[in-house]
Structure formats: C-alpha cells, structure tokens
Amino acid sequence: KGVAPAILPAAAAAQSSGSDLVAKYACTACHSLDGSPMTGPTFKGLYGSKRILADGMSVTADEAYLTESIDKPVAKVVKGFDPVMPPMLIPPNEVRQIVQYLETLK
C-alpha cells in the first residue's frame, strides 16, 4: 500500500510555485510582500489595484500589466519609483505562475 500523493487545490499550487519563483528570481530583493517600502512597489495588494505611472497615466495591475512589467520593466514605471528593474528573462509559463501568486497577496 502506497501513500497517495497530496493533491493541492489550483490556488494553493499556484501560490506555492509562484512563491518559489519569486524567491528563485530574487524579486523580494526590491519588492516587499508585506507592504513595507523598498526599491520597487510592494507586492502586497498589488493585483487589481490602480497604479499611477510616472507619466501621469493610470493602469490597473491586472494580468496583462503585471506580465508586461515583468517582461519589459521600464514600459510603465509606477510614480515615485525609479526605472531600475533589469529586464528579466523569465519563461512565459513561469511569468503566469508569478502573476497568479501576486493575485493571492491581499
């Protein structure tokens, strides 16, 4: 008799793998998970929030915006932050997992 593997709900699996990827790519070197100020905007409460950009425009931090921000970090810089994030060469499937994880950080 073997032990059946644990089956994680999709949200928990996304959170786990997304969290692992945030660590792998050292995102928390510049982005906090708890709202505290750092070099880059906090990830806490980011998903779905309104972001005011350096050029005065505003965007919603949805999947498209977050994906673009990871792929092309200087495309839309949040007001009050310098455009210092380096381009990240992260595979699209991992970007999706990171974005799904960010959605869980309320």
Image (cartoon, rainbow, N blue to C red):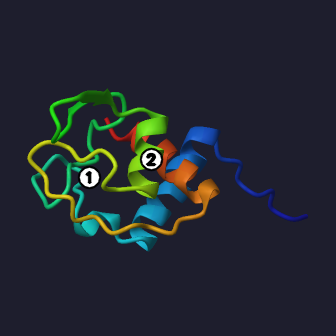
Q: Residue at x 35, y 71 (%)?
A: 26
Amino acid under disc 2: Glu
Q: CA distance from mark 1 to mark 2?
A: 20 Å
Left or right: where does residue 41 sit relative to residue 92? left
Relative vertical location of residue 81 with respect to residue 78 in this rendering, above or below: below
Amino acid under disc 1: Leu
Residue 18: image x %, image y %?
A: 50, 55
Along the line of sight, the residue nearer the viewer: 6 or 48: 48
Q: Residue at x 48, y 64 (%)?
A: 20
Q: Are marks 1 and 2 in contact (CB under 8 Å)?
A: no
Disc marking residue 6 = none
Along the line of sight, the residue nearer the viewer: 98 or 72: 72
Left or right: where does residue 98 sit relative to residue 6? left
Check disc 1 and report its element: helix, strand or loop: loop
Q: In the rendered image, which quarter is residue 56 located in? A: top left
Q: In the rendered image, which quarter is residue 52 located in? A: top left
Residue 87: image x %, image y %?
A: 39, 67
Disc marking residue 68 = 2
Q: What quarter of the picture does the N terminus occupy?
A: bottom right
For the residue carrying disc 1, how many other residues have a C-alpha within 10 Å: few (<14), some (14-19), or many (20+)?
A: some
| Residue that numbered label 1 is attached to | 33
Left or right: where does residue 55 sit relative to residue 33? left
Along the line of sight, the residue nearer the viewer: 86 or 42: 86
Left or right: where does residue 53 sit relative to residue 23? left
